[in-house]
Amino acid sequence: MNVRPARVFPVVPGLALCLALVLGGAAGAVDIAPHRALYSMSLGAAKQNSGVVAARGSMVFEWGETCDGWTVEQRYKLRMHYAEDGEIEIASNFLTWESKDGLRYRFFQKKLRNGAVDGETRGEARLDGKGLGGKVEFSKPKAATLDLAPGTIFPTAHTLLLIERAQTGEQFIARSVFDGASDENAATVSAVIGGALDANATGDEAAPKSPLLARPSWRMRLAFFPPDAGADKPDYELGMRLLDNGVSRDMVLDYSEFAIKAKLDEIEALPKPSC
């Protein structure tokens, strides 16, 4: 799942998000299940100096498939309550399309703060080949071009890579990932992958019942570092239990001073294309 924690609250993605796909033979090794999932969000741990006293909201994550690509839509609305500033409502709608060869990517995000537009990004990106660099062309917030370094991948390619490497028992992987959630260049995402969990190890009796959830999974911790190569601390971290079909059972977005939990409430399968 490419939940993209979109930097205002976190895409995917990407929760974004955040989340995803194919380098080399990964498309054949990972069987993604197109799906729509609803998560409820609440405040996890919060340090006293964060000023955050409560949070509540919801997120809808849709991962669809077409004959030539993957579509992801992540919509969330989150009410943050601060001790001094009162309540602030943050909302985001993040839409992406990524080709199945991992070389083309289109993105659009609109962020709202208390109902007013707080920023938009729109554009498309292309890589010159697997492992090669490429370019991003933004049409919003203003027309601009960025160069992508060799080795950069897009969100769906990243999620698929995580699943593929988890299946082989790899425990650490770092990649440069461009998601378009801001007008910045690609971020470095470092992932720590835990051991495989049994398909029946739900850990939550209140979780929805669905064949989509009866799958092997792994606990993962992703750290998102800013494009500045000198940064020694991530902007935020994403913990999740990711299934081998791309579904995430739960997520925790950790901003160091406070964390937001996302709990899966509902899930349904989306149709696969007949190509």
Image (spheres, helix red, strand yellow):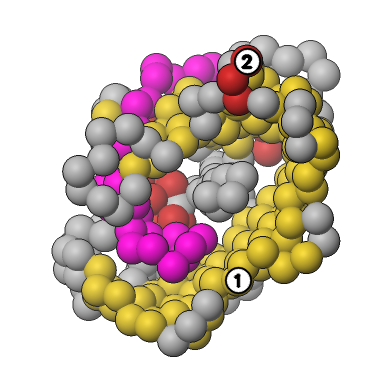
Position in image of residue 50 (x %, y %): 60, 25
Name the side, left or right, on which 22 lies relative to 49.
left
Residue 17 visible? The answer is no
When asked about the image quadrant of residue 113, the answer is bottom right
Crowding at mark 1 (Cα within 10 Å: few <14, some 14-19, many 20+) = many
Name the side, left or right, on which 158 lies relative to 38.
left
Residue depicted at x 75% and y 31%:
84
Indicate which disc, 1 or 2, sits on the residue closer to the N terminus.
Answer: 2
How much space separates mark 1 and mark 2, taking CA atoms? 32 Å
User: Which amino acid does the dot numbered 2 rest on?
Assistant: Gln
173 in relation to 193, above or below: below
Which residue was labeled with disc 1?
Answer: 120
Queried whether the magenta region covers residue 108, the answer comes back as no
Which residue was labeled with disc 2?
Answer: 48
Position in image of residue 176 (x %, y %): 28, 52
Residue situated furthest front in the rendering: 84
214 in relation to 121, above or below: above
Queried whether the magenta region covers residue 193, the answer comes back as yes
Residue depicted at x 60% and y 36%:
248
Residue depicted at x 44% and y 72%:
105
Q: Secondary structure at mark 2?
A: helix
User: Which amino acid does the dot numbered 1 rest on?
Assistant: Glu
217 in relation to 140, above or below: above
Which is more toward the observer, 267 or 211?
A: 267
What residue range appears in magenta?
173-199
When asked about the image quadrant of residue 54, the answer is top right
